[in-house]
């Protein structure tokens, strides 16, 4: 993560909370990366078994879906922190430069609200589905797979708090005045 000045600060000079968020970000990237690679390999195996061996793998589709859930939620959290998500800033660009920071803060507050909803409703979903199992994989609880929702909600909430406290200082995103 580069500072707007272009250089990475020495690790010791970064606040402890930001360093912890760096590690959490790397963990999210690792989970999302392993999930997408795993999905690609499993889907390739599924195609091979279905069309070459003429006997499909019963486990390939549900595991691919489980990995897609992990990739989606943890990847979204990582994208939010890295400012790599889709954003429509057409309205913000029409505002005076002095209001750009306020609009960023508003977005961060909205993300905290969305993250809180992900946590609350995600926990409810996990509780509701905890005792359900996948027919193809009876060892895997549906609620365990859906636990990605509240966990990634908590991670996103922490990333939003980081932005609220430290702004985009530790992001590759240019400062609002540099975007004009």
Image (spheres, rainbow, N blue to C red):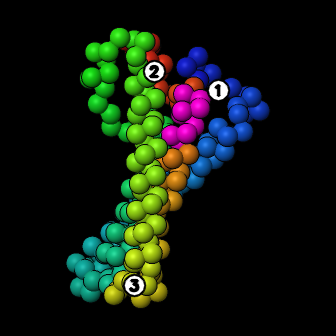
Q: Is residue 119 above or below residue 172?
A: below
Report if residue 109 is visible in the image. Answer: yes
The magenta stretch spans which residues? 159-167
Where disc 1 sits, the SS reads loop
Q: Earlier in the sequence, mark 3 or mark 1?
A: 1
Gap between marks 2 and 3, in whole Å? 46 Å
Answer whether residue 55 is magenta in the image.
no
Look at mark 3 in the image and give the residue it sits on.
Answer: 133
Other residues around mark 1 within 10 Å, as few (<14) / some (14–19) / many (≥20)? few
Q: Quadrant of residue 127?
A: bottom left
Residue 101, numbered label: 2
Between label 3 and label 1, give the one nearer the viewer.
3
Q: Is residue 120 above or below residue 131?
A: above
Residue 36 rendering spot, x and y as whole percentages: 41, 59
Q: Earlier in the sequence, mark 2 or mark 1?
A: 1
Residue 57 rendering spot, x and y as whole percentages: 32, 83
């Amino acid at each position: 993560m580069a500072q707007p000045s272009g250089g990475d600060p020495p690790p010791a000079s970064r606040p402890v909370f930001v360093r912890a968020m760096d590690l959490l970000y790397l963990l999210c990237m690792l989970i999302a990366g392993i999930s997408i690679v795993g999905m690609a390999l499993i889907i390739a195996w599924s195609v091979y078994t279905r069309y070459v061996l003429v006997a499909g793998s019963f486990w390939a589709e549900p595991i691919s879906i489980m990995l897609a859930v992990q990739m989606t939620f943890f990847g979204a959290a990582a994208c939010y922190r890295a400012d790599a998500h889709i954003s429509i800033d057409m309205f913000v660009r029409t505002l005076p430069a002095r209001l750009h920071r306020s609009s960023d803060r508003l977005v961060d507050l909205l993300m905290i609200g969305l993250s809180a909803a992900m946590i609350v409703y995600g926990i409810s979903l996990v509780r509701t589905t905890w005792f359900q199992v996948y027919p193809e994989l009876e060892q895997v609880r549906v609620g365990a797979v859906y636990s990605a929702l509240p966990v990634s909600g908590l991670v996103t909430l922490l990333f939003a708090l980081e932005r609220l406290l430290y702004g985009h200082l530790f992001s590759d995103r240019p400062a609002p005045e540099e975007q004009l």
